[in-house]
């Protein structure tokens, strides 16, 4: 069988802090977490699943998977970024700091009367748009979401059910980003993008900061067991999640774990940026038809790149088979381990670890052995239920 991944070690790593790392300072992370806690029943701490039998089977000390399929009722970590960024946008209009208010106040008639009618706009492969639509609906405002061609009906319906208008375009994700940014000013929309490749960098930073709560939870859960990760593998689309995870980790651990990004071959802009090795981000064009729709993004978020470039140990580009295998492994665990319903963009880390640990030379390449504790993030559940069943039940995407 052909090698199912490509690794580029990060020759640009310098561990220099910058404005991007400051976004995830302990002070900022605590402020973000406090806001999420004010969401009441709309906020829940997701499980950190310890796959002890899988780790024993693969020859590792431990594997932990943060299960974001149980994040609220949206089945994805994106809830955190959407809620926080829309709330920050409202606070900016009210000239107040988010630390001065809570979720209920921002939902109040008083705030609605002050703001009038707003329309929040997003570009999304699914989960980000759903989170912005959810937040807009909670704050009694409108929302419009532009989605790439080929977006499955499950993801469209999920957003429409939250009261948002959805426009499925004939463009890829990056084209949707450009379109929303272009239309936003002329139509008076409040544009909430999860990347700073277009539009307001401040807004993109709010989305990234919102994700910090997920990593803070994971660190707190591991701390309660007196365990620290030695390796963290995190998926990158535009890189906002990966940068957020790395940013929080850098500010909480004096001894930083090894940090790697994971991408599908079809949209491996961070891998190509590492390959170029000149400090500049590279982009991927075209349809980027990976099963991991949420990772099919070709233009790195500049804010993410500033942090990932300085701190990642390496960039990994993966065959779709690894994501498919990860879905099957998590959904059909060894006896004693908990099952996780992981979507195509959530499972790539598990499939990758399974593949690497079966090869002695690959294990050495990543310094993975019986003393290693791996932290992974299953960022979504079965947000495309048909595709989930096709892959997990019927073997779509296999080695043949």
Image: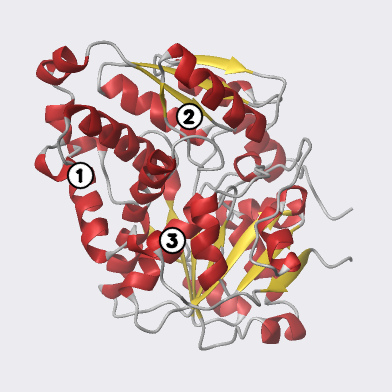
Where is mark 3, residue-wise? 245
Query: Eyeballing the image, is 295 above or below 96?
Result: below
Q: Are marks 2 and 3 in contact (CB under 8 Å)?
A: no
Residue at 33%, 71% (x, y): give it: 251
Label 3 crowding class (10 Å Cα cut-off): few <14, some 14-19, many 20+? Answer: many
Query: Taking the image as drawn, is residue 174 in sight?
Result: yes
Location of residue 51 in the rendering, given as x and y in whole percent from the top left corner: 48, 68
Task: Please state which of residues 273 and 366 is positioned toward the viewer in this rendering.
Answer: 273
User: What kind of element bears circle 1?
Assistant: helix
Location of residue 369 (image quadrant): bottom right
Location of residue 321 (image quadrant): bottom right
Q: Quadrant of the N terminus?
A: bottom right
User: What kind of element bears circle 3?
Assistant: helix
Residue at 60%, 41% (x, y): give it: 294
Where is mark 1, residue-wise? 35
CA distance for labels 3 and 1: 18 Å
Any mark on residue 129, and which?
2
Task: Please state which of residues 19 and 102 is positioned toward the viewer in this rendering.
Answer: 19
Any mark on residue 296, and which?
none
- Position of 197 compared to 211: left or right? right
Q: Earlier in the sequence, mark 1 or mark 2?
A: 1
């Amino acid at each position: 069988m052909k090698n199912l991944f490509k690794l580029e070690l990060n020759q640009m790593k310098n561990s220099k802090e910058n404005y991007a790392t400051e976004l995830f300072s302990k002070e900022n992370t605590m402020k973000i977490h406090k806001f999420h806690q004010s969401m009441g029943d709309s906020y829940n701490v997701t499980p950190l699943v310890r796959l002890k039998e899988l780790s024993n089977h693969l020859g590792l000390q431990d594997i932990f998977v943060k299960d974001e399929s149980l994040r609220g009722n949206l089945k994805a970590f994106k809830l955190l970024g959407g809620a926080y960024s829309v709330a920050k946008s409202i606070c900016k209009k009210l000239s107040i700091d988010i630390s001065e208010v809570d979720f209920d106040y921002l939902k109040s008639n008083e705030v609605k009367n002050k703001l009038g009618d707003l329309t929040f706009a997003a570009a999304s492969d699914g989960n980000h748009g759903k989170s912005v639509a959810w937040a807009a609906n909670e704050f009694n405002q409108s929302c419009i979401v532009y989605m790439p061609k080929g977006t499955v009906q499950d993801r469209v319906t999920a957003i429409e059910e939250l009261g948002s208008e959805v426009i499925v375009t004939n463009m890829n994700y990056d084209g949707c980003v450009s379109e929303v940014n272009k239309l936003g000013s002329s139509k008076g929309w409040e544009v909430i993008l999860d990347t700073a490749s277009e539009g307001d960098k401040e807004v993109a930073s709010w989305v990234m900061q919102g994700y910090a709560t997920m990593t803070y939870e994971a660190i707190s859960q591991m701390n309660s067991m007196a365990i620290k990760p030695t390796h963290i593998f995190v998926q990158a689309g535009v890189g906002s999640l990966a940068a957020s995870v790395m940013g929080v980790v850098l500010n909480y651990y004096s001894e930083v774990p090894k940090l790697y990004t994971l991408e599908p071959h079809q949209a491996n802009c961070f891998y190509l940026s590492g390959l170029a090795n000149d400090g500049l981000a590279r982009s991927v064009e075209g349809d980027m038809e990976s099963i991991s729709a949420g990772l099919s993004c070709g233009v790195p978020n500049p804010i993410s790149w500033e942090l990932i470039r300085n701190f990642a140990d390496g960039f990994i580009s993966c065959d779709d088979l690894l994501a498919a295998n990860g879905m099957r492994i998590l959904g059909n665990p060894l006896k004693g381990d908990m099952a996780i319903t992981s979507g195509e963009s959530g499972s790539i880390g598990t499939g990758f670890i399974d593949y690497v640990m079966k090869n002695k030379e690959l294990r050495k390449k990543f310094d993975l052995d019986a003393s290693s504790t791996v932290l992974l993030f299953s960022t979504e559940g079965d947000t495309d239920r048909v595709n989930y069943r096709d892959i997990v039940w019927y073997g779509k995407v296999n080695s043949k």
